[in-house]
Image (tube, coloured by chain):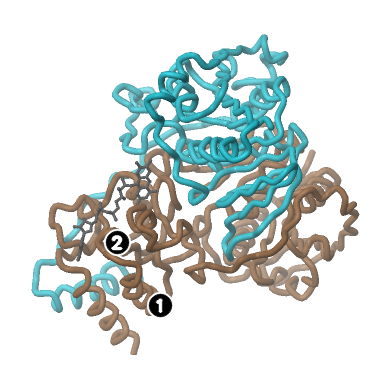
Amino acid sequence: MNIIVLLKQTFDTEAKIQLDSNNNVITDNIQYIINPYDEFALEEAIRIKEKLGDVIITVVSMGPRKVEEALRQALAMGADKSILLNDEVLFGGDEHTAAVALSQTIKQIPYDLIIGGQVAIDDGSGQVAIRVAEILDIPQVNLVTKLDVENNKLAAHRQVEVGTEVIEVFLPAMITAQKGLNEPRYPALKGIMQAKKKELKILGLADLGLTENQVGSNGANLKVISTFLPAPRNAGRILSGEISENVQELVRLLREEAKII
Amino acid sequence: MSKGIWVFIELRNAKITNSSYELLSAGRKFADKLEQDFTAVLFGYNIESLTDAIAQYGVDKIILADDPKLEKYTTDAYATVLTDLIKAKQPETVFYSHSALVKDLAPRVAERLKTGVATDCIGVEISDDGQFKFTRALYAGKLFNQVYSPHARPVMATFRPNALGVEDPSGVRNVQMEKVKVQLNLENLRTLVKEILGKVQNKMDLTEAEIIVSGGRGMKASENFKLLEELAEVLGGAVGASRAAVDSGWRDHSNQVGQTGKTVSPKLYIACGISGAIQHLAGMNSSRFVVAINKDPEANIFKIADYGIVDDLFKVIPLLTEEFKKMQA
Ligand SMILES: Cc1cc2nc3c(=O)[nH]c(=O)nc-3n(C[C@H](O)[C@H](O)[C@H](O)COP(=O)(O)OP(=O)(O)OC[C@H]3O[C@@H](n4cnc5c(N)ncnc54)[C@H](O)[C@@H]3O)c2cc1C
């Protein structure tokens, strides 16, 4: 069985976001991590491999060369191979162009199951995996918190507002991981050593058989007009009386000053 | 030239969702401003009785796809019917609410139509040249941007619950009813919903709640969340949690607020025994009012709270619940 994991490198969740004078995000001093939802995706792939044995996991990512760190980490955790799409013309697009580039890459490798995160914590858009599924013409189950693979069939729990749907689907299929699916492991020393020898292939536009018009900002439908920081929140009032006075005062403030109850 | 604004109405437990009423309220205003027709699209089974409530919002047209194959959501059925409708009628704009269903549906439909979709929008405005401009949160609210679709049509966007607001219905206009004949080959539906396990700790989804009472590690145990449930009940709100509370197994992940949970912007957010880590703040700092209850005066949460009480939450919360009850009596 061949599993592909879609992985994005994101800022660490501790990161404080600041803008420079051109309204670009300042990246100095930023620590990077594997998007947490993609880490669930990867962990699930590794667990399936541990269970079924004969599985090859290929991690596919797009981004600057820095993403190699994330791919090495994925290989150290237990993935077998990795591919990085690294080409300036591929960047600066939207969810459609990202999906075009990723699916074009996936078409070159055999796959039965593709797993991605349900959302990336940076742009919060949650579209790319589903668009890839559409381009590859395979079904998807989104927001998955439990997954069972049996032969060529999947049973997945999907988190929705009113509860959990139990969904069955035949392979090949796309799954997007939601928190709750598993607890990702830390790479072991042995894994880190082995990762150095595993394949990390770097591809560019020419390798994908795409033209410049199809990718990056040229191919994007959505354009960014402006970027801005939220209005800062200031510390308000700490109530410093005796406990029952504080509670009464709080209720009064919510009613009379904030006018929300 | 394509014209017209569509809103996709969503049902939950056979009722129209609050977020759908937000779309109906906002959609009518935009349609008036742009002088376009306003259409509500409703999918499901045995749903005709719901069209009266929709008509109250002044829609010009209701497109009704009433079919047993649409009773439960499946990606293939909904995506096929909706894409075909959009291709046939060419609306200029399609708006959705950002729900689990739409997270699954909208990117599929958008890719099939080769258009963009701005997801989880928290604001929208119309530019002077009649283009929709959408505001989105990045890094769960540490940053924002505004996006638009200069050429691709339809323009599509999904809105975070409470971003648009529900207004009183503007009144029935001359409504045209269009019933769609659903033509679906069951063999082409690739996913099968076997069952739905109902296990939700909140009656209301967190993102839709106007008041959220959240608990963190300071709650100490699962059973203590009863205190927060009682308070939320009195206020008509929902219970949220920090990751520490979720990871301790006290609450379901669907309750988690923050960068790897839900981003919420209720009118009132009451943080109990939550320290205010950056990942938590990202998910709730667009709340209108924040109240913090924490025994540590140095806790970070006080830096962004409008009102704070430095005390033991196990003493404060019951008193607070009592006080609200008294007020309502
Ligand atoms: C990749 C990543 C993603 C993350 N995503 C999220 C996320 O989405 N959401 C999130 O919340 N966190 C997230 N975190 C975790 C975050 O960093 C914090 O660890 C977490 O928010 C802490 O939760 P807490 O405030 O409940 O616990 P603590 O930080 O332990 O705070 C507990 C607070 O309770 C107070 N307290 C204790 N007892 C009482 C009492 N009797 N009365 C009153 N106050 C009391 C204490 O003074 C303390 O301030 C993430 C972390 C990482 C690394």
User: Disc 1 residue type?
Assistant: Glu
Q: Residue at x 79, y 46 (%)?
A: B83
- A104 sits to left or right of A85: right
Residue B241 in the figure: left or right of residue B34 = left
On screen, residue B3 above or below A50: below
Tell me residue A67's x, y (percent). 46, 21
Image location (x, y in percent) of residue A165: 64, 59
Residue assigned mark 2: B271
Q: Are marks 2 and 1 on the same chain?
A: yes
Which shade is chain A?
Answer: cyan
Q: Secondary structure at mark 1?
A: helix
Q: Residue at x 65, y 23 (%)?
A: A101
* Disc 1 Cβ-to-ligand 1 distance below 8 Å: no
Q: Which chain is brown?
A: B
Using a 10 Å C-alpha cutoff, classify the residue at mark 2 as few (fewer than 14 neighbours), some (14 to 19) or many (20 or more): many
Nearer to me, A19 or A108: A108
Distance between mark 2 and mark 1 Cα atoms? 16 Å
Image mark 2: chain: B
Q: Is residue A175 visible?
A: yes
Instruction: Give above or below for B248 relative to B14.
Output: above
A196 in relation to B98, above or below: above
- Work out which quarter of the rendered image holds the N terminus of chain B and state it: top right
Residue B313: which numbered mark, if any? none
> Residue lying farthest bottom?
B329
| Residue plotted at (64% across, 31% down) | A55
Q: Quadrant of residue B69?
A: bottom right
